[in-house]
Structures are given as structure tokens and as C-alpha cells.
Image (spheres, rainbow, N blue to C red):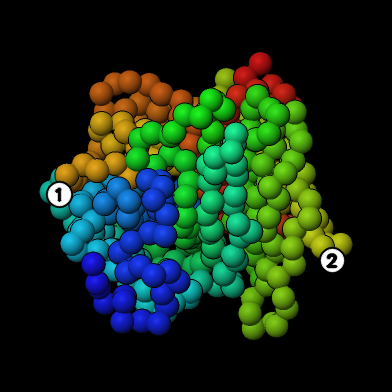
């Protein structure tokens, strides 16, 4: 099917832009944008197209105090494609490509939050190394992602209270390709379950990831470890404001000391020692700002009311709203009273980098046995 995008000279395959160059049902194109205030009040939103599932999805969530307010949205993708980044009441306007966005959530009777936020990149975009994995002959992931740090201004209304966002910490990523966890099923080839955080030869996995900025310095990086502490998948850099003319420097080593809240898999403080290719060292001390995000509320991690997760065809139009109780650090109370301890939680932080104060978004996603920290023993 032809669309306005086919008027460009950007084709990469003998296909129209509404088609993917693979038949894999898990093909996705997704953007996620987040921000948080120093007191832990936070906003996260995103949009995603799943061309081979014929689905266009979006979400907007606000966390304040001990409540997380969620809105999930889904519609059939065709014939109206996702060339416009809007899925009412959610909207993203690209004010300047790779520089500035405007994020909007319209008010509604069924959800207690709305916002209009101007997101402005304050450091260059980072394009990660390709994410590729194969298990027993089958490619289980093959995708690309870029990340960016930003500053956010505007307003947020939640549960009848209006808040002004003034230079809040902002982050975003945009990824596309093939990734596990789309469309509610993974093909079984006898190799056992695989995922985006799968690790070779281990019975556990720990992802340490950080986006941050602090007084003239910024960075985004990650490393994956198996349950024995063997590291792989290291990527990222330390970056500097463009006006000073200094190129980003690649991260070559990440060491960590994490304090997990007893009886949980979430943390309240962490220290990282980061080494870069030029011999630089960065001592990072982070403390949790509010509760960790519960990504189930966005549709990830068996999200939506049917608990079938991302990229599932749910008819022509769907909107869902709910509220989670996040008063306890390691446990989430769902609207039906169930208490869960979800794996996919991402923690905003307040931090210092070599003594410079700043802010960050620091997921520490883990499963299985992590021997160093006694998790899963």
C-alpha cells in the first residue's frame, strides 16, 4: 500500500514503506520517552508499530507518590499507517529531528493525568552497536537502537494537581528490528526460552544500564552479566556538550556495587566505576528517585488486560486504563488485588558523577541466580 513516505528517496528494499523486509511476526519499530523530577514524579510514554501483526500501539504513564497511573492504546495499523506519531489521546511531534520533541497527553474522563512537555536533547544521539543473537540456528533478535539525553520543560496534571516541569531530566530511545516478546509467542526450536537479555552458559542475567547527565557531562551505557558475573554486551559512551567540540569517549569497563533492598530484586542505591577508552574514570553514586517503573503498565511484561503483551492484534480500537499501588519497593498491587514482583522495572535516580550532581535513568533488570548479590539462591 502506498503512503506519503513512498514519495521520499529513502527506500531500502523493493517494498512500500508499510511493509517489513522480513516475514518475522516480531518485527517492531518503537520509541520510548521518559522524564522525572528530583522528587521522583515521573512520566513515560511511547509509540510502536508492528507491521507484520498489523498493530499500532501507544502508552502514557505517570507515577507520583505510591501510585502509577497507566493508559494503554492499540488500534489496527492499516489502512491508516503510523507515519503520524499520534494515537489519541497520545501524541509526539518531532519539532526538530534528533533534537527536539513535544509530548502530549490529552485529558480524559477515564484517566487522571494529562501533560504537554517539551523534550530537548542536550547531548548528541548515541547509536548502539547492533543487537544480534542466534539460538540453535534461529535468530531470536536482530535490532538497532539509538538513545539520547534531554532536558524537559512544560506541565503535568495528575490526580487533580498541576505540576510545572522545569529542566527535568529526560531520556529517550528508538529501536527497530526483530526482538523477543512481540505477538504473544516465540517459536519453539528445542533450545529453551530466549529473550533480549538471554546470556550464554548461565542460569541468571543482570543488565546494568544508565542514562545520565550532570554539570556538563553526560552518558549512556550498558553491560550484561551472566549469573556468575561474566560480562558481555558492553556498549556506550561518555559525552560532552556539542558546543565544547569534544567527541564522545567509548566506555570500556563498568564495575558495580549495588544495594538491593532485602527480600527484593530492586535497589535503593548503587555505585558504578566506569572506565573509558582514553583512560578516564567516572565514579557514579546513585540513589533511587521514587519507585521503579512497572513496565507491565505500558504493555510490556504480559501487559494489557488480557496479559498477552506487546504487538498483539486486539481489534480496530482499544483503550485501557488502570492504577497500580507501588507503595512497596519490591511488590506491585494490581487493580484486581493480585500482588506481583515483576522483572521489568526501571529506576530513575538522583546521582553524582565524580562529585558533580545530576540525574539519571538506571535500569537494573535481573532474573535467575545472580550469585554476587545472593539473588535467586
Q: Which mark is residue 69?
A: none
Q: Secondary structure at mark 2?
A: loop
Q: Which residue is mark 1?
A: 316
Q: Which residue is mark 2?
A: 278
State the image quarter where residue 358 is shown.
bottom right
Residue at image x 69%, y 62%?
237
Residue at image x 24%, y 64%?
81
The quarter of the rendered structure image containing the N terminus is bottom left
Q: Is residue 190 left or right of residue 9?
A: right
User: Where is residue 327 drawn, in percent x and y?
Assistant: 41, 31
User: Where is residue 174 drawn, in percent x and y?
Assistant: 47, 60
Residue at image x 40%, y 28%?
332
User: Where is residue 330 drawn, in percent x and y?
Assistant: 49, 27
State the image quarter where residue 183 is shown.
top left
Mark 1–mark 2 Cα distance, whole angstroms, equals: 53 Å
Figure check: 88 above or below 263: below
Amino acid at each position: 500500500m502506498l503512503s506519503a513516505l513512498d514519495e521520499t528517496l529513502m527506500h531500502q528494499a523493493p517494498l512500500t514503506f508499510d511493509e517489513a523486509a522480513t516475514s518475522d511476526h516480531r518485527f517492531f519499530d518503537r520509541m520510548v520517552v521518559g522524564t522525572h523530577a528530583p522528587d521522583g514524579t515521573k512520566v513515560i510514554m511511547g509509540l510502536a508499530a508492528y507491521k507484520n501483526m498489523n498493530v499500532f500501539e501507544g502508552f502514557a504513564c505517570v507515577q507520583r507518590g505510591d501510585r502509577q497511573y497507566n493508559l494503554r492504546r492499540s488500534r489496527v495499523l492499516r489502512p491508516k499507517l503510523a507515519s503520524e506519531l499520534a494515537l489519541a489521546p497520545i501524541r509526539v511531534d518531532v519539532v526538530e529531528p534528533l533534537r527536539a520533541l513535544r509530548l502530549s497527553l490529552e485529558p480524559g474522563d477515564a484517566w487522571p493525568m494529562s501533560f504537554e512537555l517539551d523534550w530537548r536533547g542536550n547531548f548528541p544521539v548515541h547509536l548502539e552497536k547492533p543487537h544480534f543473537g542466534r539460538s540453535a540456528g534461529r535468530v531470536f533478535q536482530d535490532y538497532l537502537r539509538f538513545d539520547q539525553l534531554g532536558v524537559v520543560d512544560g506541565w503535568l496534571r495528575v490526580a487533580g494537581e498541576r505540576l510545572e516541569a522545569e529542566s527535568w531530566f529526560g531520556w529517550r530511545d528508538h529501536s527497530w528490528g526483530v526482538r523477543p516478546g512481540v505477538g504473544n509467542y516465540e517459536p519453539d526450536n528445542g533450545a529453551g526460552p530466549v529473550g533480549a537479555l538471554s546470556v550464554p552458559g548461565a542460569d541468571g542475567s543482570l543488565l546494568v544500564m544508565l542514562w545520565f547527565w550532570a554539570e556538563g557531562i553526560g552518558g549512556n551505557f550498558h553491560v550484561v552479566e551472566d549469573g556468575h558475573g561474566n560480562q558481555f554486551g558492553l556498549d556506550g559512551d561518555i559525552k560532552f556538550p556539542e558546543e565544547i567540540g569534544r567527541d564522545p569517549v567509548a566506555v570500556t569497563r563498568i564495575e558495580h556495587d549495588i544495594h538491593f533492598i532485602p527480600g527484593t530484586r530492586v535497589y535503593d542505591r548503587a555505585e558504578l566505576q566506569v572506565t573509558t577508552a582514553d583512560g578516564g574514570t567516572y565514579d557514579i553514586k546513585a540513589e533511587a528517585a521514587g519507585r521503579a517503573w512497572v513496565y507491565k503498565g505500558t504493555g510490556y511484561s504480559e501487559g494489557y488486560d488480557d496479559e498477552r503483551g506487546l504487538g498483539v492484534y486486539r481489534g480496530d480500537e482499544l483503550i485501557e486504563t488502570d492504577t497500580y499501588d507501588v507503595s512497596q519497593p519490591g511488590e506491585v498491587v494490581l487493580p484486581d488485588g493480585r500482588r506481583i514482583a515483576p522483572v521489568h522495572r526501571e529506576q530513575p535516580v538522583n546521582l553524582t558523577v565524580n562529585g558533580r550532581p545530576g540525574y539519571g535513568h538506571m535500569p537494573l533488570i535481573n532474573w535467575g541466580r545472580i550469585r554476587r548479590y545472593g539473588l535467586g539462591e
